[in-house]
Image: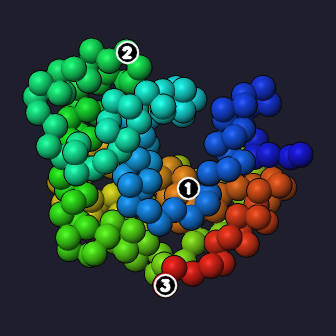
Amino acid sequence: MKRCDWVPLDDKLYADYHDKEWGVPVHNDRKLFEMLILEGAQAGLSWRTVLKKRENYRGAFSKFDYKKIAKYSDLKIKSLLKNSGIIRNRLKINSAVKNAQIFIKIRKEFGSFNKYIWSFVKFKSINNSFINLREIPAKTELSDNISKDLKKRGMSFVGSTIIYALLQSIGMVNDHQVNCFRYKEVKKENRKKLR
């Protein structure tokens, strides 16, 4: 079974993420928030590091309940900084709290974060046709635009590269390589336009 070239042959965690999640359209706000926080946590690190800590993040960050995270106190933030199961970076933890507050404001404005983020692609996934890993961009005009808008709203750890990784992970962009067994499966799933 041929996978994308970025998936290590001997890493079940990576393979499971690639096979079951990466590129599949996500329309659930809590899941979208989870991926936003995890992609931001990855900044300067490997995705493997984040995947290994993902379950710890779920426990530490109230199962990614943005309403709860938006109300985290200084005391709660201090306890997170002592939690070795997550990435103990003060800026990233503070960012998760601030981003949760802005996430809620976006939901109020648009009805859901899902409607906000997917409106950038007119509620339809972009299916690319990359053969080689080196063809896949780190960022695009689309990620630039979303990043700019989120920053304007006050979010942090939402640079264009982080946002492009988010778009890939939540299925707004299908960047599975064409020879990957998931490419056609995800492309088929992506044909279902959000109503």
Percent across and percent down for residue 60 are 33, 30
Q: Which mark is residue 195?
A: 3
- Residue appearing at x 20%, y 74% in the figure: 109
- Residue appearing at x 50%, y 50% in the figure: 165
- Quarter of the figure with residue 126: bottom right
Percent across and percent down for residue 13 are 66, 32
Left/right placement of residue 43 relative to residue 150 reads right
Q: Which mark is residue 168?
A: 1
| Residue 163 in view (yes/no) | no
Residues at marks 3 and 2 touching, judged by CB atoms closer than 8 Å: no
Q: Residues within 10 Å of mark 3 (few under 14, many from 20)?
A: few
- Residue appearing at x 52%, y 58% in the figure: 170
**Residue sticking out furthest to the right:** 1
| Residue 71 in view (yes/no) | yes
Q: Residues within 10 Å of mark 1 (few under 14, many from 20)?
A: many
Q: Which mark is residue 145?
A: none
The residue indicated by pointer 2 is 84
- Quarter of the figure with residue 24: bottom right
Secondary structure at numbered mark 2: loop
Q: CA distance from mark 3 to mark 1?
A: 20 Å
Front-most of 141 and 169?
169
Residues at marks 1 and 2 touching, judged by CB atoms closer than 8 Å: no
Secondary structure at numbered mark 1: helix
Left/right placement of residue 146 relative to residue 76 reads right
- What amino acid does circle 3 point to? Arg
Q: CA distance from mark 1 to mark 2?
A: 28 Å
Front-most of 73 and 138?
73
Mark closer to the chain start, 3 or 1: 1
- Quarter of the figure with residue 116: bottom left
Q: Residues within 10 Å of mark 2 (few under 14, many from 20)?
A: few
- Residue appearing at x 54%, y 32% in the figure: 51
Mark closer to the chain start, 3 or 2: 2
